[in-house]
Image (cartoon, coloured by chain):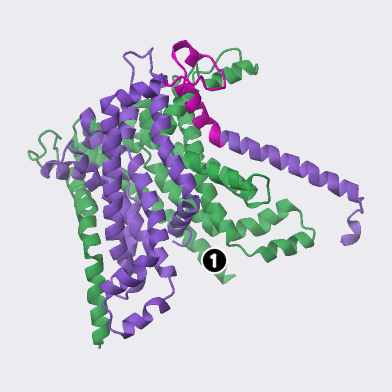
Chain colours: A green, B purple
Amino acid sequence: MKTRLERREHLSGLLFVAPLIVVLILVAGWPLARTLYFSLTDAYLDDSANHVLVGFDNFVEVAGDPVWWRAVRNTAIFTAISVAIETVLGLAIALLVHGAIPGRGLVRAAILVPWAMPVVVSTKIWEWMLNDQFGVVNRAIVGLGLADHGVAWVANGSLLLGVVIFIDVWMTTPFMVLLILAGLQILPEEIFEAAEVDGIPWWKRLWSITLPLLAPTIGVAVLFRVLDALRMFDLAYVLAGANVNAMTMSIYARDRLINNQELGIGSAASTMVFLLIAFVAIFIVGALRLDRSGATER
Amino acid sequence: MSTRIKRRSAAYYRGMRRVRRVALGCVTALVLFYVLFPYYWAIVSSTKQGAELYNSVLLPALDFRHYKELFRDANFATSIFNSLCVAISTTALSLGLGTLAAYALGRLNFPERRSLLLTVLMISIFPQVVVLSGMFELIRWFGLYNRVWSLVFAYLIFTLPFTTWVLTSFIREFPRELEEAAIMDGCSHWRILTSILLPLMGPALVSTGLLAFILAWNEFLFALTFTLTEGSRTVPVAIGLLAGNSRYEYPFGPIMAASVTVTLPLIVLVLFFQRKIVAGLTAGAVKG
């Protein structure tokens, strides 16, 4: 039997979350349902009311499109490499800032600058710096005698994905640093002092104490970054538009949907993006859980 | 074991410490350079004119013509105004709704709580492109296409789950004793929230609000898709679509001036509220 107090709490709980639920149904639930529905139709964007159901034809069409698979490959490469570099670099900078170094507060403040910049702005700045003729990066390379002429970073298709990864690393490493730094600050200080007194070298302390203790924090940070990287749109779009060399899954879906006006096919591609990301999310969350339960058993 | 450690003079250890300090200092300088140089270079480039832009003098030329042109440009002013309207409205709405929900999710006991929290978390990792078609249709139904308000509506999909999640973890940290007396006196939950918790939530609201503001200010995909004409563009779209008359005269000077201008307020805000921002970011992630 529920007491009156419990019933009252239940009711007011529902009342307090009601606005949230209504808004989320409106901005997330309903659009998602419509996207799933449109993915089964032959609708066009200019006249979306006029359509018939075509079953899974759109999915077959997308799956048969080599450009889609190119986009999937680009996104996978981009995600794997950029998140890996960001994690290692973020960990290194976080350990540096965590230690007693001169100018620690300055670094901590400066690290927020790339993070706060709009993605479009960071991309434009790097595009200018990497400009093949007048960019400061090529000037430096030629000036230092590393090459006799500049590299066509952005214009060269085969380098484009590398440039996208490079810019993304610059933009999002700060996020990694902040999360890992927060994780470092809640670790018990005594363990490190004891290890240092025992004369254990720093790399061994890092490998056998810091990293295992930090693993949950790093896991969560990697999860966030992977899911974010898999849906990446703005950076590659501003840099290269719908150029296949840097096209991500999101760019492919939007290109079919808006530029080609193919509401049905675009929705099918979006649905596939959604399923892929959901699958990766479940996989990573499962891996983290497994890891955590394994750690407590030991 | 300890017998194997060689004894060395104090001068040796002092020397080692000095080497370590210098090495760490170099690495720190390198990190600072990596993080700050691009923005510095944007400032330098934005004050150069014509051919000056193409030399690599590292100091700014302090010629502010690009900025004067930028502020005389009605479209740019409009896009800044649009961005401000969208970001402020979105932030206010998601803070309000988020606080209400966070109180229930953080303090009240009801059976749907866990699944609701999970849903909120799941929506916050939604790839935006997935709702694009459905949102497009909805926005056209509401007659909001090419209006700035369409973005306030659309942005709630990522700002609202974010504020709800972060504020919930903030509210959980307040000691329960605060409200116990009020509960004993039969105070309503509405009054507990507004007269006891809300006055204490200032810092939490500031850090969450700033992060939501930055998210909304920087958004690109929805802004690009749901607006068409220059009069309804936000700043990121305006900068993203700023292009020269031909491929060969790309207006890097004006683009850099615009970039510096729209980033400066963000950087000032972020540096000023540095601790609060970091607290908000980590409250959402580490404990989650």
Q: Quadrant of the C terminus of chain A?
A: bottom right
The spot of residue B116 in percent (x, y) is 30, 65
Q: What range is drawn magenta here?
A: B35-64
Task: Residue A193: name its quadrant.
Answer: bottom right
SS class, disc 1: helix
Task: Residue A208: name its quadrant.
Answer: bottom right
Q: What amino acid is at disc 1? A: Gly
A44 relative to B135, above or below: above
A297 relative to A226, above or below: below
Please give left or right for residue B195 compared with residue A121 in the image. left
The spot of residue A1 in percent (x, y) is 25, 88
Asked if residue B85 is among those painted magenta in the image, a careful observer would answer: no
In the image, B105 versus B36, the foreground residue is B36
Asked if residue B48 is among those painted magenta in the image, a careful observer would answer: yes
Please give left or right for residue A144 compared with residue A268 in the image. right
Please give left or right for residue A28 compared with residue A115 in the image. left
In the image, B16 versus B43, the foreground residue is B43
In the image, B107 versus B269, the foreground residue is B269
B253 relative to B188, above or below: above
Residue at image location 16% in from the left, 38% down from the top? B145
The spot of residue B122 in percent (x, y) is 33, 56
Q: Which residue is mark 1?
A: A294
Residue at image location 13% in from the left, 41% down from the top? B140
